[in-house]
């Protein structure tokens, strides 16, 4: 019944079908990638819908991936999800570090965005002050999510349109082994990907915005496109930004070099930690399987 | 029994379900297809060689072309319409290599920008510019009034250069039969050539072209020009100057003589004094010459009368 419903959807609503197609098998030969991605989707959707999704996969795609074969492989993927802070990211930063990196400084009162008011203490001498306790919470959640995505081998894209920090962000991305886009954002990069790149391209699984505004102080096009393509976003929102479409907003300063260097350092450390952990688990699995 | 819902036919114009052929772009071939074509080509080449009675091992592309032209004679004028047998690499359009690995992760870290080679070039150039910016900032620091406070820090990045004035060739100090020291030097200014002999332990007489300098240069300014080098080093009454000059006008001759005197003085003076003379501009030859007249103008700069109408 449910499968029938999905097929009906596929014919009438073409855009959403394109979304679903990209969601479930973003590469044309969706073997391991689809398996990994269904894992991510499971996390986001909840356990109840898993069976429905798999049965529909069986119906609509002949080349769909088989479910993760052995119990060990499933354990590797699911075990970190059982604990709140599996990668121990709370030891990476303290409230004092955030304060010393001047993360609490926002823009002037006149530049304030209405939706940022819950995250601000108020203004002092006309400058907005961001609530660092909320920032710490949000940052912890964002780093945790990034770590889990990196652990499962997801593609992470670092985006920022600030010319001051473009080089720093590109270098950080290169050192993590992830991807960066600090240049002019062409129209259909995410929404028209099969034509902009090649047909079988795999889109990023997470987009990190180090500054959500572009050079003309409008919201970056990537936020809206990622929301359209169901790609989760993490964004550093300053007091003049709109946090509504971002999945994991982190209220904080995006103008000072100290603050940006701190963010870059934190994200690099989380991603490297997560990847090292994954390699460790794979090795352990290899050892236990051979034994 | 599940009640059947009445199915409604949705009528859609045929233009919507016809495939847009132009939008698909050039036809793409898979790598396996091309590999199969290459195999078939090789086999076909050997068959052709056997047919023509030639050796399959040494059958080149020209032989193939010749054989095909012989076996399939064509009267068509357009060469590209005639039957052709070439390697598949030349016939099928080139496929761009896949830019990502088995898991779908792109190789290049700037893949998602679209123009990865261009932006990676910009990224590398930026690193070079950072170095030039560093140099600019150091220069700025040095231009500040109290920069001597940070001298230690600055000297970490600076190397001491040799003094520029050591590049001047000092005329050799020669000695008279009487033991009097003298030096000879030349100078030029604006097509005036001068030659000077500076004799030591004199009384300050200046002879130019056989005449006293008072007669030769009635104008005060020219005499001042002659005296200035000696005044600067403070050896006014010590030398006897004997000079010859020719060409140009009186001012230029005076300038040429001044340069010649300064150069001659180099051999009588210490290193520090040489640097001071260089900084005073005594040792620099004046490069100014007469500017040429241009066509369409009265002179070098003067234009003809401008009439509005």
Image (spheres, coloured by chain):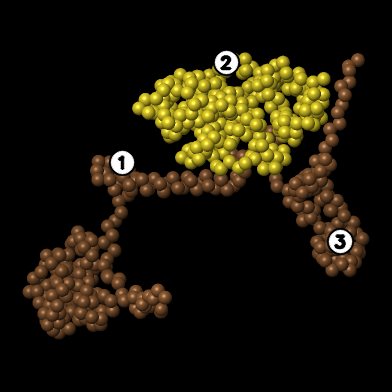
Chain colours: A yellow, B brown
Q: Nearer the viewer, residue B201 or B215?
A: B215
Residue lying at 76% horizontally and 22% vertically, measured from the top left: A54
- Are dots 3 and 1 on a single chain? yes
x and y percentages locating residue A207 in the rendered image:
59, 31
The quadrant in which residue A187 appears is top right
Q: Nearer the viewer, residue B305 or B180?
A: B305
Q: Is residue B128 above or below residue A161?
A: below
Query: Does the residue at mark 3 contact the one at mark 1 (Cβ under 8 Å)?
Result: no
Q: Chain of mark 3?
A: B
Could you say whether the residue bearing mark 2 is in a helix, strand or loop?
loop
- Viewer-nearest of labels 3 and 1? 3
- Residue A151 in the image: state x and y as whole percent: 61, 25
Tell me the quadrant of the picture where the C terminus of chain B can be found.
Answer: bottom left
Residue at the image point whose x is 66% and y is 34% from the top: A203
Dot 3: what SS? Answer: loop
Ranked by sequence position, the earlier of labels 3 and 1 is 3
Marks 3 and 2, how far apart in space? 71 Å
Q: Which residue is found at the position 61% from the left and 18% from the top? A: A80
- Output the chain of dot 1: B
- In the picture, the quarter occupied by the N terminus of chain B is top right
Q: Are marks 1 and 2 on the same chain?
A: no
Residue A181 percent location from the top left of the image: 57, 39
> Extreme front residue here?
B309
Residue B12 falls left or right of residue A208 = right
Pointer 3: what residue? B83
- Residue named by callout 1: B153
In the picture of the structure, the residue carrying the numbered disc 2 is A84
Residue B12 shown left or right of residue B204 in the figure: right
Picture residue at 62% right of the left edge, 15% below the top: A82
Q: Is B197 situated above or below A288?
A: below
* Label 2 neighbour load within 10 Å: few <14, some 14-19, many 20+: few
């Amino acid at each position: 019944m449910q499968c029938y419903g999905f097929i009906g959807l596929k014919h009438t609503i073409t855009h959403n079908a394109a979304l679903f197609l990209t969601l479930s098998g973003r590469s044309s030969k969706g073997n391991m990638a689809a398996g990994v991605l269904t894992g991510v989707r499971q996390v986001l959707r909840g356990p109840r819908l898993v069976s429905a999704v798999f049965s529909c996969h069986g119906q609509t795609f002949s080349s769909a991936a088989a479910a993760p074969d052995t119990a060990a492989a499933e354990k590797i993927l699911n075990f970190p999800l059982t604990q709140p802070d599996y990668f121990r990211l709370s030891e990476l930063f303290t409230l004092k570090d955030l304060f010393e990196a001047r993360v609490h400084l926002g823009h002037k009162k006149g530049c304030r965005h209405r939706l940022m008011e819950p995250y601000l203490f108020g203004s002092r001498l006309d400058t907005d002050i961001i609530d660092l306790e909320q920032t710490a919470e949000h940052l912890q959640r964002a780093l945790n999510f990034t770590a889990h995505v990196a652990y499962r081998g997801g593609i992470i894209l670092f985006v920022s349109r600030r010319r001051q920090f473009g080089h720093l962000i590109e270098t950080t991305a290169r050192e993590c082994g992830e991807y960066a886009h600090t240049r002019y954002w062409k129209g259909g990069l995410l929404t028209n990907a099969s034509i902009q790149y090649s047909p079988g391209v795999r889109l990023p699984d997470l987009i990190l915005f180090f500054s959500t505004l572009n050079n003309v102080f409008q919201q970056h096009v990537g936020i809206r496109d990622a929301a359209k393509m169901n790609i989760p976003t993490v964004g550093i929102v300053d007091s003049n930004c709109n946090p509504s479409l971002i999945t994991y907003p982190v209220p904080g300063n995006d103008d000072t070099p100290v603050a940006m260097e701190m963010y870059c350092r934190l994200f690099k450390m989380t991603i490297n930690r997560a990847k090292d952990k994954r390699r460790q688990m794979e090795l352990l699995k290899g050892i236990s399987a051979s034994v | 029994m599940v009640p059947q819902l009445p199915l409604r036919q949705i009528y859609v114009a045929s233009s919507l379900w016809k495939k847009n052929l132009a939008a698909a772009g050039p036809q793409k071939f898979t790598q396996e297809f091309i590999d199969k074509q290459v195999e078939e080509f090789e086999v076909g080449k050997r068959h052709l060689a056997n047919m023509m009675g030639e050796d399959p091992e040494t059958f080149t592309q020209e032989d193939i072309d010749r054989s095909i032209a012989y076996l399939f004679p064509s009267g068509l004028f357009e060469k590209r319409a005639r039957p052709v047998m070439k390697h598949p690499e030349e016939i099928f359009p080139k496929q761009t290599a896949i830019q990502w690995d088995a898991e779908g992760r792109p190789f290049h870290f700037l893949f998602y920008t679209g123009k990865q080679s261009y932006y990676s070039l910009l990224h590398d150039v930026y690193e070079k510019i950072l170095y030039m910016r560093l140099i600019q900032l150091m220069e700025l620091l040095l231009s500040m009034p109290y920069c001597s406070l940070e001298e230690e820090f600055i000297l970490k990045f600076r190397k001491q250069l040799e003094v520029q004035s050591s590049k001047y060739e000092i005329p050799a100090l020669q000695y008279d039969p009487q033991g009097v020291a003298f030096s000879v030097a030349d100078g030029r200014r604006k097509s005036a050539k001068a030659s000077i002999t500076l004799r030591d332990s004199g009384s300050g007489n200046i002879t130019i072209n056989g005449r006293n300098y008072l007669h030769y240069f009635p104008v005060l300014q020219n005499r001042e020009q002659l005296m200035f080098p000696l005044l600067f080093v403070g050896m006014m009454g010590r030398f006897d100057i004997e000079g010859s000059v020719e060409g140009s006008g009186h001012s230029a001759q005076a300038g040429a003589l001044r340069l010649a005197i300064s150069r001659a003085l180099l051999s009588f003076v210490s290193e520090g004094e040489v640097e001071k003379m260089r900084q005073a501009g005594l040792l620099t030859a004046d490069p100014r010459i007469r500017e040429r007249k241009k066509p369409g103008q009265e002179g070098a700069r003067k234009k003809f009368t401008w009439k509005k109408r």
